[in-house]
Image (cartoon, coloured by chain):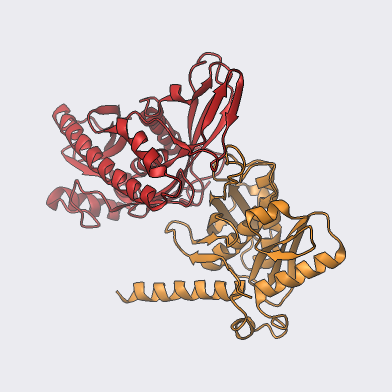
Chain colours: A orange, B red
């Protein structure tokens, strides 16, 4: 199975503490994340005495944030909250800004600009946004319990499961799912849309796990890299490579 | 409330001392030299990213069909939205526009929309009923000075790059054709304004182009001059120390030559990009659209 994987680049902005750009493999969706951490909490009432307050802002490419964006923000915030060791920096804030740079236009629609519209499924944006946010946190040096990756899975009318479905496949799909898995194969998020039965969901979850972690038995010992090497590119090895590339680039910058 | 770190007194004195005594800038540039400008286009039409040194701006153009305003029945709608988010600098906050943000959007508005760079009449489909609403979303991703200049270049570059779907009108019926059905059409752009920001030091004696964030913090006055290939479109000098008129006039000459230079390189980059994606004869369309800019 030749698997496509997202394009990731870390630290491509200079002002944010951490930043990452993420290009989805299934469409032209491009999201850039900027993470500032730790910051002072801007409103005293939001300060958490024993935890880090997390703020996620999602900015669409061609409009102001609506209901859909706010929902995605909230889901991303909850996942980040479960991953981040907030107790290490109490009374501070983690500010994560996700800027959608581009989405794929549906050229079969007149106008063709409805890709990011309010009526469309939020799952693709959630998948990209979550990955970008996690990568941004990784780059900003946020202390985390685990590293996770999210993938989008579509179940077609003929009950086939597709990982990273294209725009056409997404439109034809019976159900769409987003799964996020942590490094130790723990499921951190599952959001589904459409009609499906348990068996389909389980197969979709299995496929997603393999796409994030590599082979099925990976994650038992928490060692992803060894297992992931032979079976195409999994999301975790992609993240690993991006971090490596950043460290190498930093090292070269230091030498000059 | 978050804010951008101020330049310390020592650093301020250092920058000013170097400038006034030996005309040296922190990054070793000439006084009238811009940082390297890089323009890249996204996969979609109407998406441009401009980097000016460390400053990075992305602009997305989109269009939809709406009802024109009651007062202007024969005009389409063109809006520019600028919002500074914390991604650009921890000093920016969401939902609380700073003075800088308001000034930026007003200058862009004045430079591009009110100088009629876009022919809004050509956006009209059926008078009083249907028109195109073109929207430019300016996303500032990274901030290190020269925001006005970078935003203006990015917006113009994206506008030149954008194609809207073709429409046909038969009596009352309006058909919007998909991108696959008919070749999309470029916007009718009347001229191409470019903003050039001048920073003044030493009682207006020293004039700097493309100041970085640090240089911006220690300047005495600033002036934004917008020019196209032929003339000045807009001047904005909000406060600061007074500047000798002779110097201001000199600035105008510089602005026009800089605008010409930038428009030339923008056009070269645009032609290269459109030639690359010449799948549906878009470069032929391009020639038609480019003609009035001269």
Quick check: B167 left or right of B188? right
Q: Quadrant of residue A127?
A: bottom right
Asked whether B210 or A112 is in front, the reply is A112
* Between B203 and A245, the one nearer to me in the picture: A245
Across and down, in percent, residue B6 comes to 38, 50
The quadrant of the rendering that contains the C terminus of chain A is bottom left
Residue placed at 13% from the left, 52% from the top? B22
Is residue A82 toward the left or the right of residue B152 in the image? Answer: right
* Residue B113 to residue A79: above or below: above
What percent of the width, then of the height, locates residue A158?
Answer: 79, 61
Camera-side residue of B195 and A30: A30
- Residue B53 appears in the figure: yes
Q: Quadrant of residue B24 in the image?
A: bottom left
What is the x, y in percent for residue A222? 68, 82
The quarter of the picture where residue A90 lies is bottom right
Q: Is residue A85 visible?
A: no
């Amino acid at each position: 199975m030749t698997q496509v994987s997202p394009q990731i680049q870390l630290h491509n902005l200079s002002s944010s503490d951490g930043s990452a750009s993420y290009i989805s493999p299934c469409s032209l969706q491009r999201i850039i994340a900027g993470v500032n951490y730790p910051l002072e909490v801007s409103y005293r009432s939001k300060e958490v005495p024993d935890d880090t307050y997390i703020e996620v802002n999602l900015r669409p490419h061609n409009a102001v944030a609506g209901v859909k964006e706010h929902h995605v923000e909230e889901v991303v915030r909850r996942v980040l909250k479960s991953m981040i060791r907030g107790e290490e920096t109490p009374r501070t804030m983690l500010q994560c800004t996700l800027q959608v740079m581009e989405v794929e236009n549906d050229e079969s629609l007149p106008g063709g600009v409805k890709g990011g519209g309010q009526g469309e499924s939020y799952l693709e944006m959630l998948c990209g946004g979550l990955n970008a946010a996690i990568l941004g946190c990784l780059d900003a040096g946020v202390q985390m319990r685990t590293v996770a990756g999210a993938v989008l899975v579509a179940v077609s009318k003929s009950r086939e499961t597709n990982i990273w479905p294209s725009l056409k496949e997404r439109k034809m799909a019976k159900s769409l799912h987003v799964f996020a898995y942590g490094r130790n194969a723990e499921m951190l998020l599952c959001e589904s849309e459409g009609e499906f039965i348990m068996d389909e969901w389980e197969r979709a979850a299995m496929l997603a796990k393999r796409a994030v972690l590599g082979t099925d038995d990976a994650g038992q010992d928490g060692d992803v890299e060894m297992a992931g090497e032979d079976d195409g590119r999994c999301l975790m090895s992609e993240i690993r490579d991006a971090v490596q590339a950043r460290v190498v680039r930093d090292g070269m910058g230091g030498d000059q | 409330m978050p804010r951008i770190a101020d330049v310390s007194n020592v650093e301020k004195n250092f920058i000013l001392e170097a400038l006034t005594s030996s005309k040296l800038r922190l990054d070793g540039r000439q006084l009238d030299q811009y940082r390297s400008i890089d323009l890249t286009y996204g996969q979609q039409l109407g998406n441009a990213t401009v980097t000016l040194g460390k400053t990075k701006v992305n602009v997305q153009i989109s269009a939809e069909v709406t009802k024109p305003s009651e007062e202007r029945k024969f005009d389409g709608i063109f809006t520019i939205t600028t919002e500074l988010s914390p991604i650009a600098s921890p000093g920016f906050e969401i939902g609380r526009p700073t003075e800088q943000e308001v000034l930026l959007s007003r200058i862009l508005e004045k430079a591009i929309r009110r100088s009629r760079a876009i022919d809004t009449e050509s956006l009209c489909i059926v008078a009083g009923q249907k028109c195109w609403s073109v929207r430019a979303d300016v996303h500032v991703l990274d901030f290190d000075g020269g925001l006005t200049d970078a935003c203006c270049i990015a917006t113009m570059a994206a506008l030149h790059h954008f194609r809207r779907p073709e429409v046909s009108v038969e009596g009352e019926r309006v058909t919007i054709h998909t991108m696959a059905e008919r070749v999309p059409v470029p916007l009718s752009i009347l001229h191409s304004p470019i903003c050039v920001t001048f920073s003044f030091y030493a009682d207006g004696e020293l004039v700097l182009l493309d100041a970085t964030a640090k240089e911006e913090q220690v300047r005495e006055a600033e002036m934004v001059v917008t020019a196209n290939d032929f003339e000045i479109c807009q001047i904005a000098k909000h406060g600061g120390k007074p500047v000798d008129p002779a110097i201001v006039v000199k600035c105008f000459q510089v602005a026009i030559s800089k605008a010409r230079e930038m428009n030339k390189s923008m056009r070269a980059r645009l032609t290269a990009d459109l030639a690359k994606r010449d799948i549906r004869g878009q470069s032929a369309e391009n020639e038609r659209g480019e003609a009035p800019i001269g």
